[in-house]
Amino acid sequence: MPFPSKLSYAAFWRYSPRGTAPVSRNSRGLRDAIKNDSFLQITREGKIKIVNAIDYSAAAVKAEVVNSRFLNDYLGPDAALVPIPRSAPLSDKYALWPSRRICEALVAEGFGAEVVPLLKRKTAVQKAATAPQGMRPDPEKHYESTIIDNEVPMLIQRPITLVDDIITRGASFIGMFRRVAEAFPGRKISCFALMRTQRDGDVTTLKAPVQGTITLYPSGKLWRDDGSPQQQTLF
């Protein structure tokens, strides 16, 4: 089975890697708290609260569905939520796995029917966030480094949603989509990321739900299109 040349996805938050405005700095704080499954300080109704970033995010997604109904197409109540593996094999069953925690928090808010940790990283790949330009793992590396975990019960007939913490290029979604599609031919497979990278400039808001596409060209280049000329990213 070839890699998909085009794949749709949805994302909720956005962040700026290099923006200098206060909102951009806050976006990186939210990113770090999600990736570390840690806590945030927020102000609500004039009071300061400490909240878990992932649980807070899942509740924010639920509150937004009435305005961004397309989210239901990716996080329907009957979907099996499949977390994208981390860049290296887990050291033990209690190791930090942000995508799995995101899946659990979403199910707790009424999204998806169950969490199915179907994918397992067998060999490590370079972390995309720390890789030099041009050295980020491509879909092939994500595909080859990942297997279907045979210890996880096979799904019956549920649609599948791949869930990641952050989408930058979309390489992991392309690679994992092929791995899952080979194991479950004909199954509906969707992709959802809690946060997306805005490559250049500052962000003006953190909450920015989008329904976009990832295009894989024959050259290997990836094009992530979030729906407007200002939100297209070529890698």
Image (cartoon, helix red, strand yellow):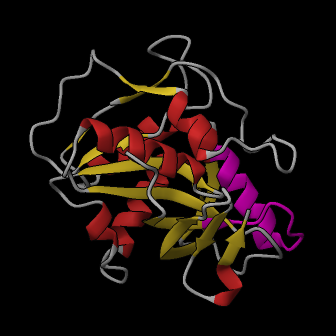
Residue 131 lies, with reference to residue 119, above or below; the image says below
Q: Position of residue 67 (x, y in %)?
A: 36, 84
**Residue at 46% across, 51% down:** 3
In the image, 146 versus 73, the foreground residue is: 146
Q: Quadrant of the C terminus?
A: bottom right
> Where, by quadrant of the figure, is residue 66 drawn?
bottom left
**Does residue 153 sit above or below 5 in this rendering?**
above
Q: Percent from the top left, x then y, of residue 195?
A: 57, 59
Q: Residue at x 56, y 73 (%)?
A: 207
Task: Answer left or right for 32 relative to 45.
Answer: right
* Image side of residue 65 versus residue 38, left or right: left
Q: Residue furthest bottom?
A: 229
Dominant secondary-structure state across the stretch colored magenta: helix
**Residue 216 higher or lower than 97, as above or below:** below
Does the segment drawn in magenta span residue 210?
A: no
Q: Determine the residue located farthest toward the left in the rendered image.
A: 157
Q: Which residue is drawn at the image coordinates 31% and 63% (left, top)?
A: 74
Q: Residue at x 23, y 56 (%)?
A: 188
Residue 87 sits in quarter: top right
Q: Identify the magenta region.
A: 14-33
Q: Is residue 1 above or below residue 75?
A: above
